[in-house]
Image (cartoon, rainbow, N blue to C red):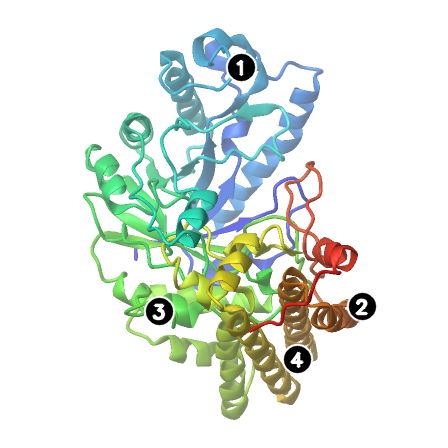
Amino acid sequence: MRYLLDMVHHNPGEPPFATRFSDPAHLRDYGFNGQVFKHINCVATYAATGVDCFPAGTPERAWLDGFTPGIEREIARAKARGLQVFFHLDLFVLPRRLVDHFHAEICDSLTGRILLERPRTLALHAVLFAELAQRFPAVDGYIIRVGETYLFDTPHHTGNSPIPRVGPAWTPDYLYAETLAGRPPQEPRWAPQQAEAYVTLLRFLRQEICERHGQQLFFRTWDVFPDKLHARLDHYLEVTNAVEPHPKLAFSIKHTALDFWRRVKVNECLTRGRHPQIIEVQCQREYEGKGAYPNYVMAGVIDGFEENAGKIGLKDLLGSPQILGVYAWSRGGGWFGPYLKHELWPDLNAYVLAAYVNDPRRTEAAIFREYAEERLGLNAVAARDFRELCLLSSRAILLGRHCAAFDQTLAESVLPTACWMRDDRLGGRGQLAVVLDYLRAHRAEAAALAEKAEAVRLWEQIEDLAKRLSFPDAATGEVVTISATYGRVLFSIVHQGWRALIAGGRGHREEFLDAASHYEAGWREFRALGESPWCASLYEGRYFNLPGTPEVAGMDASLEYYRRTLGETPQPIT
Protein backbone atom coordinates (compact mmCIF):
# COMPACT_ATOMS: atom_id res chain seq x y z
CA MET A 1 0.00 0.00 0.00
CA ARG A 2 1.34 3.42 -0.93
CA TYR A 3 -0.46 5.09 1.96
CA LEU A 4 -1.12 4.01 5.52
CA LEU A 5 -2.15 7.26 7.16
CA ASP A 6 -3.24 7.98 10.71
CA MET A 7 -5.06 10.89 12.29
CA VAL A 8 -5.90 11.65 15.88
CA HIS A 9 -9.18 13.54 15.67
CA HIS A 10 -9.13 15.59 18.85
CA ASN A 11 -12.56 16.67 20.08
CA PRO A 12 -13.35 20.08 18.56
CA GLY A 13 -12.99 22.85 21.11
CA GLU A 14 -11.46 20.62 23.80
CA PRO A 15 -7.89 20.06 24.98
CA PRO A 16 -6.02 17.53 22.79
CA PHE A 17 -5.99 13.88 23.84
CA ALA A 18 -2.91 12.55 25.59
CA THR A 19 -2.11 9.71 23.22
CA ARG A 20 0.86 7.81 21.86
CA PHE A 21 -0.66 8.19 18.41
CA SER A 22 0.35 11.85 18.37
CA ASP A 23 3.95 10.64 18.50
CA PRO A 24 5.43 9.99 15.03
CA ALA A 25 7.78 7.40 16.54
CA HIS A 26 4.79 5.32 17.70
CA LEU A 27 3.25 5.51 14.24
CA ARG A 28 6.48 4.38 12.61
CA ASP A 29 6.74 1.52 15.09
CA TYR A 30 3.27 0.32 14.06
CA GLY A 31 4.00 0.66 10.33
CA PHE A 32 2.18 3.88 9.42
CA ASN A 33 3.90 6.00 6.76
CA GLY A 34 1.85 9.18 7.02
CA GLN A 35 0.38 11.44 9.70
CA VAL A 36 -2.67 13.65 9.29
CA PHE A 37 -3.26 16.92 11.15
CA LYS A 38 -5.86 19.69 11.01
CA HIS A 39 -6.30 23.45 10.64
CA ILE A 40 -3.28 24.45 8.53
CA ASN A 41 -5.67 26.41 6.32
CA CYS A 42 -6.58 28.57 9.29
CA VAL A 43 -3.06 29.98 9.67
CA ALA A 44 -3.06 31.31 6.10
CA THR A 45 -2.95 35.12 6.10
CA TYR A 46 -4.20 35.79 2.54
CA ALA A 47 -1.67 38.59 2.37
CA ALA A 48 -1.69 38.39 -1.43
CA THR A 49 -5.24 39.78 -1.44
CA GLY A 50 -4.12 43.01 0.26
CA VAL A 51 -6.49 42.36 3.16
CA ASP A 52 -4.96 42.29 6.65
CA CYS A 53 -6.90 39.43 8.20
CA PHE A 54 -4.88 39.39 11.43
CA PRO A 55 -3.95 43.01 12.30
CA ALA A 56 -1.25 43.57 14.90
CA GLY A 57 -2.61 44.07 18.41
CA THR A 58 -5.93 42.29 17.74
CA PRO A 59 -7.26 39.05 19.27
CA GLU A 60 -7.04 37.51 15.79
CA ARG A 61 -3.30 38.19 15.60
CA ALA A 62 -2.74 36.88 19.12
CA TRP A 63 -4.55 33.66 18.19
CA LEU A 64 -2.56 33.31 14.95
CA ASP A 65 0.78 33.86 16.69
CA GLY A 66 -0.11 31.25 19.32
CA PHE A 67 -1.54 28.66 16.91
CA THR A 68 0.97 28.70 14.03
CA PRO A 69 3.99 27.30 15.94
CA GLY A 70 1.98 24.20 16.78
CA ILE A 71 1.39 23.55 13.08
CA GLU A 72 5.11 24.00 12.40
CA ARG A 73 6.07 21.59 15.20
CA GLU A 74 3.68 18.92 13.94
CA ILE A 75 5.19 19.03 10.48
CA ALA A 76 8.79 19.03 11.73
CA ARG A 77 8.31 16.11 14.15
CA ALA A 78 6.56 13.94 11.54
CA LYS A 79 9.15 14.67 8.86
CA ALA A 80 11.98 13.93 11.28
CA ARG A 81 10.58 10.38 11.55
CA GLY A 82 10.22 10.00 7.80
CA LEU A 83 6.44 10.29 7.70
CA GLN A 84 4.42 11.88 4.94
CA VAL A 85 2.38 14.83 6.21
CA PHE A 86 -1.19 15.58 5.24
CA PHE A 87 -3.67 18.10 6.58
CA HIS A 88 -7.39 17.52 6.86
CA LEU A 89 -9.29 20.62 5.66
CA ASP A 90 -12.96 21.59 5.82
CA LEU A 91 -14.23 23.77 2.97
CA PHE A 92 -15.22 26.55 3.01
CA VAL A 93 -13.48 28.03 6.08
CA LEU A 94 -12.12 31.59 5.79
CA PRO A 95 -11.04 34.37 8.17
CA ARG A 96 -13.99 36.51 9.23
CA ARG A 97 -12.22 39.70 8.21
CA LEU A 98 -11.63 38.29 4.72
CA VAL A 99 -15.28 37.29 4.36
CA ASP A 100 -16.43 40.69 5.61
CA HIS A 101 -14.17 42.45 3.09
CA PHE A 102 -15.33 40.37 0.10
CA HIS A 103 -18.86 39.72 1.33
CA ALA A 104 -20.60 41.19 -1.68
CA GLU A 105 -18.42 39.16 -4.04
CA ILE A 106 -18.57 35.73 -2.36
CA CYS A 107 -21.70 35.54 -0.18
CA ASP A 108 -25.43 35.21 -0.67
CA SER A 109 -26.96 38.54 0.28
CA LEU A 110 -29.85 36.92 2.17
CA THR A 111 -28.31 33.95 3.95
CA GLY A 112 -24.70 35.08 4.20
CA ARG A 113 -23.49 31.69 2.90
CA ILE A 114 -20.23 31.62 0.98
CA LEU A 115 -21.15 30.54 -2.54
CA LEU A 116 -19.11 28.26 -4.76
CA GLU A 117 -20.39 29.82 -7.98
CA ARG A 118 -19.06 33.29 -7.21
CA PRO A 119 -15.75 33.69 -9.12
CA ARG A 120 -14.03 35.46 -6.23
CA THR A 121 -14.69 32.45 -3.94
CA LEU A 122 -12.42 30.08 -5.82
CA ALA A 123 -9.93 32.86 -6.50
CA LEU A 124 -9.49 33.29 -2.74
CA HIS A 125 -8.95 29.57 -2.37
CA ALA A 126 -6.31 29.68 -5.09
CA VAL A 127 -4.56 32.27 -2.89
CA LEU A 128 -4.93 29.91 0.06
CA PHE A 129 -3.29 26.91 -1.61
CA ALA A 130 -0.53 29.02 -3.13
CA GLU A 131 0.34 30.52 0.28
CA LEU A 132 0.31 27.13 1.99
CA ALA A 133 2.53 25.58 -0.70
CA GLN A 134 5.03 28.43 -0.35
CA ARG A 135 5.08 28.55 3.45
CA PHE A 136 4.91 24.80 4.16
CA PRO A 137 6.77 23.01 1.34
CA ALA A 138 7.21 19.85 3.45
CA VAL A 139 3.46 19.17 3.42
CA ASP A 140 2.69 16.31 1.03
CA GLY A 141 -0.97 17.09 0.48
CA TYR A 142 -4.47 17.50 1.80
CA ILE A 143 -7.51 15.48 2.77
CA ILE A 144 -10.47 17.73 1.98
CA ARG A 145 -13.97 17.39 3.34
CA VAL A 146 -17.13 19.35 2.57
CA GLY A 147 -20.43 19.32 4.43
CA GLU A 148 -19.24 19.97 7.98
CA THR A 149 -17.30 23.02 9.13
CA TYR A 150 -16.29 22.85 12.79
CA LEU A 151 -15.03 26.21 14.01
CA PHE A 152 -14.64 25.43 17.72
CA ASP A 153 -10.83 25.61 17.55
CA THR A 154 -10.70 28.52 15.09
CA PRO A 155 -12.74 31.33 16.66
CA HIS A 156 -11.82 33.98 14.07
CA HIS A 157 -12.96 32.01 11.04
CA THR A 158 -16.34 31.33 9.49
CA GLY A 159 -17.61 29.03 6.80
CA ASN A 160 -20.08 26.61 5.28
CA SER A 161 -20.20 23.74 2.81
CA PRO A 162 -19.66 24.54 -0.88
CA ILE A 163 -22.38 22.06 -1.87
CA PRO A 164 -25.88 23.61 -2.04
CA ARG A 165 -28.56 22.36 0.32
CA VAL A 166 -31.09 21.41 -2.33
CA GLY A 167 -32.84 18.35 -3.58
CA PRO A 168 -34.75 15.51 -1.91
CA ALA A 169 -33.18 13.47 0.83
CA TRP A 170 -33.99 10.22 2.54
CA THR A 171 -34.60 11.87 5.88
CA PRO A 172 -35.17 9.65 8.92
CA ASP A 173 -38.73 10.94 9.32
CA TYR A 174 -39.57 10.06 5.72
CA LEU A 175 -37.97 6.64 5.90
CA TYR A 176 -39.62 5.65 9.13
CA ALA A 177 -43.05 6.94 8.13
CA GLU A 178 -42.97 4.99 4.87
CA THR A 179 -41.70 1.84 6.56
CA LEU A 180 -44.27 1.92 9.34
CA ALA A 181 -46.96 2.40 6.69
CA GLY A 182 -45.71 -0.69 4.87
CA ARG A 183 -44.57 1.26 1.79
CA PRO A 184 -41.04 1.02 0.37
CA PRO A 185 -39.37 4.46 0.28
CA GLN A 186 -39.24 6.00 -3.19
CA GLU A 187 -35.89 5.86 -4.93
CA PRO A 188 -33.96 8.95 -3.85
CA ARG A 189 -32.40 11.31 -6.34
CA TRP A 190 -29.96 14.12 -5.68
CA ALA A 191 -30.46 17.52 -7.24
CA PRO A 192 -28.43 18.26 -10.40
CA GLN A 193 -27.00 21.36 -8.69
CA GLN A 194 -25.25 19.15 -6.16
CA ALA A 195 -23.47 17.03 -8.75
CA GLU A 196 -22.51 20.15 -10.70
CA ALA A 197 -21.11 21.78 -7.56
CA TYR A 198 -18.98 18.74 -6.73
CA VAL A 199 -17.57 18.66 -10.26
CA THR A 200 -16.78 22.38 -10.25
CA LEU A 201 -15.02 22.11 -6.90
CA LEU A 202 -13.11 18.95 -7.79
CA ARG A 203 -11.85 20.39 -11.07
CA PHE A 204 -10.64 23.47 -9.23
CA LEU A 205 -8.89 21.45 -6.51
CA ARG A 206 -7.31 19.17 -9.10
CA GLN A 207 -5.94 22.16 -10.94
CA GLU A 208 -4.63 24.06 -7.90
CA ILE A 209 -3.39 21.29 -5.62
CA CYS A 210 -2.38 18.51 -7.99
CA GLU A 211 -1.31 20.38 -11.12
CA ARG A 212 -0.13 23.79 -9.97
CA HIS A 213 1.53 22.76 -6.69
CA GLY A 214 2.25 19.07 -7.30
CA GLN A 215 0.64 17.93 -4.04
CA GLN A 216 -1.53 14.90 -3.30
CA LEU A 217 -5.27 15.48 -2.93
CA PHE A 218 -7.56 13.01 -1.18
CA PHE A 219 -11.14 14.18 -1.51
CA ARG A 220 -13.39 12.77 1.21
CA THR A 221 -16.80 11.73 -0.10
CA TRP A 222 -18.20 11.67 3.43
CA ASP A 223 -21.82 12.59 4.08
CA VAL A 224 -24.46 10.71 6.02
CA PHE A 225 -27.42 10.39 3.66
CA PRO A 226 -27.85 7.44 1.28
CA ASP A 227 -28.92 9.70 -1.58
CA LYS A 228 -25.65 11.64 -1.52
CA LEU A 229 -22.12 11.21 -2.82
CA HIS A 230 -20.67 8.90 -0.17
CA ALA A 231 -23.09 6.00 -0.29
CA ARG A 232 -24.67 6.13 -3.76
CA LEU A 233 -22.57 4.47 -6.45
CA ASP A 234 -24.49 6.07 -9.31
CA HIS A 235 -24.06 9.54 -7.81
CA TYR A 236 -20.39 8.87 -7.06
CA LEU A 237 -19.79 7.81 -10.65
CA GLU A 238 -21.78 10.71 -12.08
CA VAL A 239 -19.54 13.14 -10.20
CA THR A 240 -16.15 11.45 -10.40
CA ASN A 241 -16.46 10.38 -14.05
CA ALA A 242 -16.80 14.06 -14.95
CA VAL A 243 -13.39 14.81 -13.43
CA GLU A 244 -10.28 13.91 -15.41
CA PRO A 245 -7.98 11.52 -13.48
CA HIS A 246 -4.66 12.81 -12.20
CA PRO A 247 -1.79 10.83 -10.59
CA LYS A 248 -2.17 12.93 -7.44
CA LEU A 249 -5.96 12.87 -7.16
CA ALA A 250 -7.72 10.15 -5.15
CA PHE A 251 -10.91 9.75 -3.15
CA SER A 252 -11.16 8.88 0.53
CA ILE A 253 -14.15 6.66 1.35
CA LYS A 254 -15.35 4.99 4.56
CA HIS A 255 -15.49 1.20 4.37
CA THR A 256 -19.11 1.38 5.53
CA ALA A 257 -21.83 2.83 3.33
CA LEU A 258 -23.01 5.13 6.10
CA ASP A 259 -21.11 5.99 9.28
CA PHE A 260 -18.97 3.53 11.25
CA TRP A 261 -22.02 1.53 12.30
CA ARG A 262 -22.96 -2.12 12.34
CA ARG A 263 -25.73 -3.53 10.15
CA VAL A 264 -24.88 -1.26 7.25
CA LYS A 265 -23.45 -2.61 4.01
CA VAL A 266 -19.88 -2.25 2.82
CA ASN A 267 -19.50 0.88 0.70
CA GLU A 268 -20.31 -0.02 -2.90
CA CYS A 269 -18.30 2.92 -4.23
CA LEU A 270 -15.04 1.27 -3.21
CA THR A 271 -12.98 -0.11 -6.16
CA ARG A 272 -15.32 1.56 -8.64
CA GLY A 273 -14.90 4.46 -11.05
CA ARG A 274 -11.94 6.09 -12.80
CA HIS A 275 -9.97 7.27 -9.77
CA PRO A 276 -7.79 5.67 -7.09
CA GLN A 277 -9.07 5.54 -3.52
CA ILE A 278 -8.06 5.14 0.09
CA ILE A 279 -10.28 3.42 2.65
CA GLU A 280 -11.21 5.08 5.94
CA VAL A 281 -11.29 2.97 9.12
CA GLN A 282 -12.02 4.10 12.69
CA CYS A 283 -10.13 2.37 15.51
CA GLN A 284 -11.83 4.15 18.43
CA ARG A 285 -15.46 3.79 17.43
CA GLU A 286 -17.42 6.82 18.56
CA TYR A 287 -20.78 5.02 18.49
CA GLU A 288 -19.41 2.06 20.44
CA GLY A 289 -17.85 3.48 23.57
CA LYS A 290 -14.54 4.81 22.24
CA GLY A 291 -12.58 2.14 24.09
CA ALA A 292 -14.23 2.60 27.49
CA TYR A 293 -15.18 -1.09 27.26
CA PRO A 294 -13.71 -3.89 25.11
CA ASN A 295 -14.46 -3.30 21.45
CA TYR A 296 -12.33 -5.29 19.05
CA VAL A 297 -13.54 -4.58 15.51
CA MET A 298 -10.66 -5.56 13.24
CA ALA A 299 -11.81 -9.15 12.75
CA GLY A 300 -14.99 -7.68 11.25
CA VAL A 301 -13.28 -4.85 9.38
CA ILE A 302 -10.77 -7.22 7.77
CA ASP A 303 -12.80 -10.41 7.25
CA GLY A 304 -16.33 -8.97 7.30
CA PHE A 305 -18.79 -8.48 10.14
CA GLU A 306 -21.15 -11.35 10.91
CA GLU A 307 -24.26 -9.40 9.90
CA ASN A 308 -23.04 -8.42 6.41
CA ALA A 309 -24.15 -10.66 3.57
CA GLY A 310 -21.07 -12.17 2.01
CA LYS A 311 -18.93 -10.92 4.93
CA ILE A 312 -17.00 -8.45 2.77
CA GLY A 313 -14.01 -6.81 4.43
CA LEU A 314 -10.64 -5.28 3.68
CA LYS A 315 -9.47 -8.71 2.53
CA ASP A 316 -11.76 -8.29 -0.49
CA LEU A 317 -10.78 -4.69 -1.22
CA LEU A 318 -7.05 -4.19 -0.73
CA GLY A 319 -6.15 -6.35 -3.70
CA SER A 320 -7.75 -3.91 -6.12
CA PRO A 321 -5.22 -1.77 -8.02
CA GLN A 322 -7.49 1.21 -7.37
CA ILE A 323 -6.90 1.05 -3.62
CA LEU A 324 -3.83 3.07 -2.65
CA GLY A 325 -4.07 2.39 1.07
CA VAL A 326 -5.93 3.05 4.29
CA TYR A 327 -6.66 6.22 6.25
CA ALA A 328 -7.05 5.29 9.92
CA TRP A 329 -8.43 7.32 12.78
CA SER A 330 -6.55 5.75 15.69
CA ARG A 331 -8.12 8.07 18.25
CA GLY A 332 -11.05 10.41 18.09
CA GLY A 333 -14.25 10.92 16.20
CA GLY A 334 -17.49 12.29 17.58
CA TRP A 335 -17.69 14.56 20.61
CA PHE A 336 -17.29 14.55 24.38
CA GLY A 337 -16.47 11.25 26.11
CA PRO A 338 -15.99 8.63 27.23
CA TYR A 339 -12.50 9.89 28.01
CA LEU A 340 -9.90 7.16 28.41
CA LYS A 341 -7.20 6.74 31.01
CA HIS A 342 -5.62 3.91 29.00
CA GLU A 343 -5.87 3.37 25.23
CA LEU A 344 -5.54 -0.43 25.10
CA TRP A 345 -8.61 -1.08 22.95
CA PRO A 346 -7.99 1.51 20.19
CA ASP A 347 -4.31 0.57 20.30
CA LEU A 348 -5.14 -3.08 19.63
CA ASN A 349 -7.38 -2.13 16.70
CA ALA A 350 -4.77 0.21 15.23
CA TYR A 351 -1.96 -2.34 15.55
CA VAL A 352 -3.87 -5.14 13.83
CA LEU A 353 -5.12 -2.80 11.09
CA ALA A 354 -1.65 -1.42 10.32
CA ALA A 355 0.03 -4.82 10.32
CA TYR A 356 -2.62 -6.26 8.00
CA VAL A 357 -2.47 -3.36 5.55
CA ASN A 358 1.32 -3.69 5.42
CA ASP A 359 1.06 -7.40 4.66
CA PRO A 360 -2.41 -8.62 3.61
CA ARG A 361 -0.98 -12.14 3.18
CA ARG A 362 -1.09 -12.47 6.96
CA THR A 363 -4.29 -13.42 8.74
CA GLU A 364 -6.04 -11.18 11.22
CA ALA A 365 -5.84 -13.99 13.79
CA ALA A 366 -2.06 -14.28 13.43
CA ILE A 367 -1.57 -10.55 13.85
CA PHE A 368 -3.87 -10.53 16.88
CA ARG A 369 -1.85 -13.33 18.46
CA GLU A 370 1.35 -11.38 17.80
CA TYR A 371 -0.05 -8.37 19.64
CA ALA A 372 -1.29 -10.48 22.56
CA GLU A 373 1.96 -12.40 22.99
CA GLU A 374 4.61 -9.85 22.00
CA ARG A 375 3.02 -6.55 22.99
CA LEU A 376 1.00 -7.69 26.01
CA GLY A 377 3.29 -10.56 27.08
CA LEU A 378 0.56 -13.20 27.28
CA ASN A 379 1.34 -16.88 27.01
CA ALA A 380 -0.42 -18.97 24.36
CA VAL A 381 -3.31 -20.01 26.63
CA ALA A 382 -3.92 -16.50 27.92
CA ALA A 383 -3.70 -15.11 24.37
CA ARG A 384 -6.41 -17.57 23.32
CA ASP A 385 -8.68 -16.44 26.19
CA PHE A 386 -7.96 -12.79 25.41
CA ARG A 387 -9.00 -13.38 21.81
CA GLU A 388 -12.22 -15.03 22.92
CA LEU A 389 -12.95 -11.99 25.08
CA CYS A 390 -12.31 -9.65 22.16
CA LEU A 391 -14.43 -11.55 19.67
CA LEU A 392 -17.28 -11.75 22.19
CA SER A 393 -17.12 -7.97 22.57
CA SER A 394 -17.96 -7.51 18.89
CA ARG A 395 -21.13 -9.58 19.17
CA ALA A 396 -22.12 -8.16 22.57
CA ILE A 397 -21.97 -4.61 21.20
CA LEU A 398 -24.01 -5.55 18.14
CA LEU A 399 -26.79 -7.01 20.29
CA GLY A 400 -26.64 -4.39 23.01
CA ARG A 401 -26.84 -1.16 21.09
CA HIS A 402 -28.59 -2.14 17.85
CA CYS A 403 -31.96 -3.80 17.26
CA ALA A 404 -32.08 -6.64 14.75
CA ALA A 405 -35.86 -6.66 14.30
CA PHE A 406 -35.76 -3.02 13.25
CA ASP A 407 -32.40 -2.74 11.50
CA GLN A 408 -32.75 -5.82 9.34
CA THR A 409 -35.95 -4.39 7.89
CA LEU A 410 -34.39 -0.97 7.33
CA ALA A 411 -30.95 -2.17 6.29
CA GLU A 412 -30.62 0.63 3.72
CA SER A 413 -31.96 3.40 5.94
CA VAL A 414 -30.07 6.52 6.85
CA LEU A 415 -30.00 6.04 10.60
CA PRO A 416 -30.85 2.51 11.76
CA THR A 417 -30.81 2.39 15.58
CA ALA A 418 -27.25 3.64 15.48
CA CYS A 419 -27.72 7.17 16.76
CA TRP A 420 -29.88 6.62 19.82
CA MET A 421 -26.69 5.88 21.74
CA ARG A 422 -23.59 7.84 20.78
CA ASP A 423 -20.46 9.27 22.34
CA ASP A 424 -21.17 9.11 26.10
CA ARG A 425 -24.93 9.66 25.91
CA LEU A 426 -28.05 7.48 26.13
CA GLY A 427 -31.12 8.59 24.21
CA GLY A 428 -34.63 7.70 25.31
CA ARG A 429 -38.17 7.61 24.02
CA GLY A 430 -37.64 10.61 21.73
CA GLN A 431 -34.63 9.15 19.97
CA LEU A 432 -36.12 5.64 19.90
CA ALA A 433 -39.73 6.60 19.10
CA VAL A 434 -39.82 5.17 15.58
CA VAL A 435 -37.99 2.02 16.69
CA LEU A 436 -40.40 1.43 19.55
CA ASP A 437 -43.39 2.14 17.31
CA TYR A 438 -42.09 -0.34 14.79
CA LEU A 439 -41.48 -3.03 17.40
CA ARG A 440 -44.95 -2.60 18.82
CA ALA A 441 -46.64 -2.64 15.41
CA HIS A 442 -44.79 -5.81 14.43
CA ARG A 443 -45.05 -7.60 17.80
CA ALA A 444 -41.28 -7.61 18.08
CA GLU A 445 -40.82 -6.03 21.51
CA ALA A 446 -40.10 -9.31 23.28
CA ALA A 447 -37.49 -10.24 20.66
CA ALA A 448 -35.78 -6.88 21.11
CA LEU A 449 -35.65 -7.30 24.88
CA ALA A 450 -34.34 -10.85 24.53
CA GLU A 451 -31.57 -9.44 22.33
CA LYS A 452 -30.62 -6.92 25.03
CA ALA A 453 -30.68 -9.63 27.70
CA GLU A 454 -28.39 -11.80 25.57
CA ALA A 455 -25.98 -8.88 25.26
CA VAL A 456 -25.79 -8.66 29.06
CA ARG A 457 -25.15 -12.41 29.26
CA LEU A 458 -22.26 -12.02 26.82
CA TRP A 459 -20.85 -9.14 28.85
CA GLU A 460 -20.98 -11.33 31.94
CA GLN A 461 -18.97 -13.93 30.03
CA ILE A 462 -16.50 -11.23 28.95
CA GLU A 463 -16.16 -10.06 32.53
CA ASP A 464 -15.47 -13.61 33.72
CA LEU A 465 -12.77 -14.05 31.10
CA ALA A 466 -11.18 -10.72 32.05
CA LYS A 467 -11.00 -11.70 35.71
CA ARG A 468 -9.29 -14.99 34.84
CA LEU A 469 -6.61 -13.41 32.68
CA SER A 470 -3.20 -12.61 34.12
CA PHE A 471 -1.11 -9.89 32.48
CA PRO A 472 2.59 -9.25 33.13
CA ASP A 473 1.74 -5.56 33.34
CA ALA A 474 -0.60 -5.08 36.30
CA ALA A 475 -2.07 -1.86 34.92
CA THR A 476 -3.08 -3.54 31.67
CA GLY A 477 -4.76 -6.33 33.58
CA GLU A 478 -6.67 -3.84 35.68
CA VAL A 479 -7.76 -1.95 32.56
CA VAL A 480 -9.07 -5.14 30.94
CA THR A 481 -11.03 -6.11 34.06
CA ILE A 482 -12.48 -2.67 34.76
CA SER A 483 -13.40 -2.05 31.13
CA ALA A 484 -15.13 -5.44 30.93
CA THR A 485 -17.16 -4.61 34.04
CA TYR A 486 -17.90 -1.20 32.49
CA GLY A 487 -19.42 -2.95 29.47
CA ARG A 488 -21.45 -5.34 31.59
CA VAL A 489 -22.91 -2.58 33.79
CA LEU A 490 -23.55 -0.17 30.91
CA PHE A 491 -25.44 -2.70 28.83
CA SER A 492 -27.39 -3.83 31.89
CA ILE A 493 -28.54 -0.20 32.15
CA VAL A 494 -29.39 -0.27 28.44
CA HIS A 495 -31.39 -3.48 28.82
CA GLN A 496 -33.39 -2.16 31.76
CA GLY A 497 -33.88 1.20 30.03
CA TRP A 498 -35.41 -0.52 27.00
CA ARG A 499 -37.59 -2.63 29.30
CA ALA A 500 -38.83 0.53 30.99
CA LEU A 501 -39.53 2.34 27.72
CA ILE A 502 -41.50 -0.57 26.30
CA ALA A 503 -43.42 -1.19 29.54
CA GLY A 504 -44.08 2.52 30.01
CA GLY A 505 -45.36 2.87 26.46
CA ARG A 506 -47.68 -0.06 27.05
CA GLY A 507 -48.89 1.30 30.37
CA HIS A 508 -47.60 -1.79 32.14
CA ARG A 509 -46.97 -0.30 35.57
CA GLU A 510 -45.49 -3.29 37.41
CA GLU A 511 -43.12 -4.19 34.59
CA PHE A 512 -42.05 -0.55 34.32
CA LEU A 513 -41.40 -0.16 38.05
CA ASP A 514 -39.34 -3.36 38.13
CA ALA A 515 -37.26 -2.21 35.13
CA ALA A 516 -36.85 1.29 36.59
CA SER A 517 -35.62 -0.17 39.87
CA HIS A 518 -32.99 -2.26 38.09
CA TYR A 519 -32.08 0.73 35.90
CA GLU A 520 -31.39 2.89 38.96
CA ALA A 521 -29.41 0.10 40.63
CA GLY A 522 -27.31 -0.16 37.49
CA TRP A 523 -26.46 3.54 37.62
CA ARG A 524 -25.41 3.20 41.26
CA GLU A 525 -23.05 0.36 40.37
CA PHE A 526 -21.81 2.32 37.35
CA ARG A 527 -20.98 5.42 39.40
CA ALA A 528 -19.16 3.32 41.97
CA LEU A 529 -17.11 1.74 39.18
CA GLY A 530 -16.24 5.23 37.98
CA GLU A 531 -14.16 5.73 41.12
CA SER A 532 -11.70 3.04 39.92
CA PRO A 533 -8.38 4.57 38.89
CA TRP A 534 -8.34 3.10 35.37
CA CYS A 535 -12.04 3.52 34.61
CA ALA A 536 -12.94 5.72 31.63
CA SER A 537 -15.39 8.55 32.18
CA LEU A 538 -19.00 7.37 32.38
CA TYR A 539 -21.98 7.61 30.08
CA GLU A 540 -24.84 9.95 30.96
CA GLY A 541 -28.59 9.42 30.87
CA ARG A 542 -29.16 12.45 28.67
CA TYR A 543 -28.84 12.70 24.91
CA PHE A 544 -26.28 14.30 22.65
CA ASN A 545 -26.14 18.03 22.03
CA LEU A 546 -23.47 20.04 20.25
CA PRO A 547 -21.28 22.19 22.51
CA GLY A 548 -23.00 25.44 23.36
CA THR A 549 -26.49 24.20 22.50
CA PRO A 550 -29.27 23.29 24.98
CA GLU A 551 -29.24 19.88 26.61
CA VAL A 552 -31.44 17.20 25.06
CA ALA A 553 -33.55 14.83 27.13
CA GLY A 554 -32.54 11.18 27.01
CA MET A 555 -33.14 7.94 28.86
CA ASP A 556 -33.27 9.43 32.37
CA ALA A 557 -35.95 11.95 31.41
CA SER A 558 -37.93 9.24 29.63
CA LEU A 559 -38.18 7.15 32.78
CA GLU A 560 -39.25 10.20 34.76
CA TYR A 561 -41.91 10.90 32.11
CA TYR A 562 -43.41 7.45 32.51
CA ARG A 563 -43.27 7.69 36.30
CA ARG A 564 -45.47 10.79 36.05
CA THR A 565 -47.86 9.58 33.40
CA LEU A 566 -48.48 5.91 34.18
CA GLY A 567 -52.01 5.18 35.23
CA GLU A 568 -53.50 3.77 32.07
CA THR A 569 -54.81 0.21 31.84
CA PRO A 570 -51.83 -2.12 31.84
CA GLN A 571 -51.08 -3.81 28.52
CA PRO A 572 -48.91 -6.93 28.81
CA ILE A 573 -45.86 -7.16 26.57
CA THR A 574 -46.27 -9.99 24.08
Residue 65 in picture, x, y percent from top left: 64, 27
First in sequence: mark 1 or mark 2?
A: 1
Q: In the image, 142: left or right of 558?
A: left
Q: What amino acid type should be assigned to the residue bearing mark 4? A: Gly
Q: Is residue 10 above or below residue 454?
A: above
Q: What amino acid type should be assigned to the residue bearing mark 3? A: Gly
> Which image quarter: residue 548?
top right
Mark 2 neighbour class, 10 Å CA radius: few under 14, some 14 to 19, many 20 or more: few
Q: What amino acid type should be assigned to the residue bearing mark 1? A: Leu
Mark 1 neighbour class, 10 Å CA radius: few under 14, some 14 to 19, many 20 or more: many
Q: Residue at x 22, y 33 (%)?
A: 243
**What number is the disc on residue 304?**
3
Q: Residue at x 42, y 28 (%)?
A: 165
Q: Residue at x 46, y 64 (%)?
A: 442
First in sequence: mark 2 or mark 4?
A: 4
**What number is the disc on residue 500?**
none
In the image as oriented, which residue stretches furthest toward the bottom? Answer: 381
> Which image quarter: residue 207?
top left
Q: Is residue 50 visible?
A: no
Say which element carries label 2: loop
Mark 4 neighbour class, 10 Å CA radius: few under 14, some 14 to 19, many 20 or more: some
Task: Give whichever of 362, 57 is nearer the camera.
Answer: 362
Q: CA distance from mark 1 to mark 4?
A: 54 Å
Q: Which residue is mark 1?
A: 98
* Contact check, label 1 and label 2, Cβ < 8 Å: no
Say which of marks 4 and 3 sits in front: 3
Q: Which residue is mark 2?
A: 531
Q: Which residue is mark 4?
A: 477
